[in-house]
Amino acid sequence: MPVQQIIYHMLRVFINNERLTDSDDSGAGKLNNYHIKTLMLWACELKPRTWWTDDVSLVRICVELLHDLAVWLTEARCTHYFINNCNLVDSSFNLEMIRYRLTSISTSWLSSWFVNNYIQKCAGLCPCNIERLYDNATTTELLQNAVLVIVKWRANTTLLDKFEVFDDALYDITSVVSLGSLTPRTVTCWFTELSKISTSLPVYFSSVAFLHVAYRTARCGLNDELMDVLASLVRQPVGSRRYYSRHSSVLLGKAANLMKAVLQRPVSDSTMQLQIELSKAYLCRALSCEDSDSDSIYCLANVYLAVLYYTTGQYQFAIDHCTLVMISQNHSQCSAHIVQHELLPKIDDDTDNVVGLAVFYQHLRSAALNQQHVYVTAFTTELFAYYLHIKCLLLTTYQQLSDITNSQSSIYEVQPYVKYLNDTQHMFIADVLLWKLLKDISGHKFFCNKQSVISRYRSKYADKFSTSFLVKLLQKSAVENLTVFCKLGMQNFGSVATIVTTDFEALYAYKRGDYQRCLQLSTQNVHTLLYAVLLSNFSTFPEFIQLLDDDIISLTALTLIVNPECRDLSGYNNYTNISQLTLSLYLMTQCQLKLCHSVTSLAETLNYVKVAPRRHRVEYTLDLLVLKMIAYKAVTYITTMMK
């Protein structure tokens, strides 16, 4: 309860004979302005008029507790929690002096002490007119009115203080993620702890973490640690630390878990796309391993990769992986591995129908023959690779007979698939049903140079997993989450701060070259933010700056040359943040320059740039530098056009 906490602080200060001090004073146990603000927050939950009345009064309760404490000290009742018959207070304390001081306290004396040491400090944090109201309180009634005004002011400013603390928290999250290192364990810890504070902070953290992984991947490639971090970010467990080793079967299991999660999300969901790309990365890493299980998972990993590439429309890659399975000389070591339909995303209606019929057959067989453990909904790895290969050939129209003019190309027909079916001794029901559905296309012939496919695949496979698309996908997902975060921020703090929700959308449009869309959004944001009372910030840590261009990168590099530790200094976010207004003006100007707008349009933007410095204090170093750079660009362009 707040009352109990206030009493606790009062007891500690009084017994130790301490006075309230300013934050500059040192000394253990002394209260500073932080404690005063905390007490004021607690006071907002109390009824100030009951603090000194003769009824249920905070002061009266405190007096009674102090008198009870004097009795406990005199009679040695302060028992030890863990040790029986042991008193916490020994002869080293001057118990007689403490008892005398405690028993001599009266309600009127403690009321005066409380007002002079607490209320006065609280009033000192208020605006001048409220502080004067307290100074002129010569009667109890005037004092009560002054306290009511103080509490009301505090209640009205609480949301603003929360916004400032929230803004500082965003800086702290960004700096810790950027300057430190993420692990699967720390990611889980971040999500757990931030969710206890706010529903929006985990969204912001995931955005920063996505950008962090994208930044490190673009610079150093995708390693095992980053893959596990990304899996934790999409809320997929990666196992305990002792399973982090690069073992092919472990990597295959991680990919399988992600593929299961893919089935639970809509196709357009960005998290699903991340899970697909991460599954590909795990499978490629599994194929690159050389251990005791690498041969046994070879065919299965290639089939799953083919399925994932088929799902994302990369049919040639799917064909290449199927081909590697089809030309494999020995399937005996991987025969124990089967393609589980539970892991397969939607391929086509044929496979869905096959699985449905197989499930129905399993039900009938179990009911008729009382066989409860019949498993018929799986596919043989090699047969499924043949089937998927044919499906991809059908979808790549340039490989059909009517589109090929090279008569020297070898003919690759459906017949090898039929021959392989005839030679296979152990098949699943799903394999047979899938073959039946292929009979209607058995007349089609496909031109495909088998050796060229393999050599072309191997040249691409030498690069293993391509990270460029993953980096773009991480940036896109981060921007989507940041847009959601801005909308939540507007709902929570829109009454005390002007927050636009499309600044990251505009930034991403600029990143992908859609300058017209970026200009439209940025112009709207400038009109909204130009005369705003309170502005939100945009971080220029490497995670965010990758979304911008070389000019901003060069400018932030100059700040690091002047002060290499400016990013490491806790709280000095004036070197690493720019306001939403500055960002919008920069994007607006850059888009106008790239779209070759008229001099009149640039002149109007230059007027906005001249007004913007009034919205930023002199210590906002990076804001003022960016605004000067914008003005220089606009003036240079206007001068050139006028000549």
Image: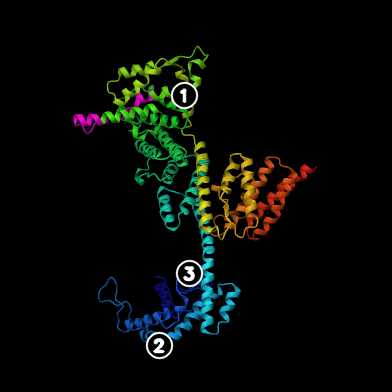
Please state which amino acid type lies under the numbered disc 2: Ser
The answer to whether residue 264 of the structure is visible from this angle is yes
Answer above or below: position of 22 versus 566. below
Q: Three-letter amino acid code at disc 3?
A: Leu
Instruction: Verify whether residue 502 appears in magenta.
Output: no
Look at mark 2 in the image and give the residue it sits on. 104
Question: Mark 1 = which residue?
Answer: 395
Circle 1 SS class: helix
In the picture, measured across the screen, residue 258 lies left or right of residue 174, that is: left
The answer to which image quadrant residue 280 occupies is top left
Do labels 2 and 3 touch, CB within 8 Å? Answer: no
Point out residue 472 in the picture as x, y percentages from the top left corner: 52, 39
- Is tag 2's residue or tag 3's residue first in the polypeptide sequence? 3
- Label 1 sits on what residue type? Leu
Name the secondary structure under disc 3.
Answer: helix
Of residue 317 and residue 581, the one placed in the foreground of this image is 581
Q: Nearer the viewer, residue 570 or 594?
A: 594
Query: Percent position (x, y) of residue 157?
Result: 54, 66
Question: Label 2 vs label 1: CA separation?
Answer: 94 Å
Q: Nearer the viewer, mark 2 or mark 3?
A: 3
Can residue 555 be seen by looking at this rendering?
no
Q: Is residue 144 above or below residue 545?
A: below
The image quadrant that residue 246 belongs to is top left
Start-end of magenta stretch = 363-386
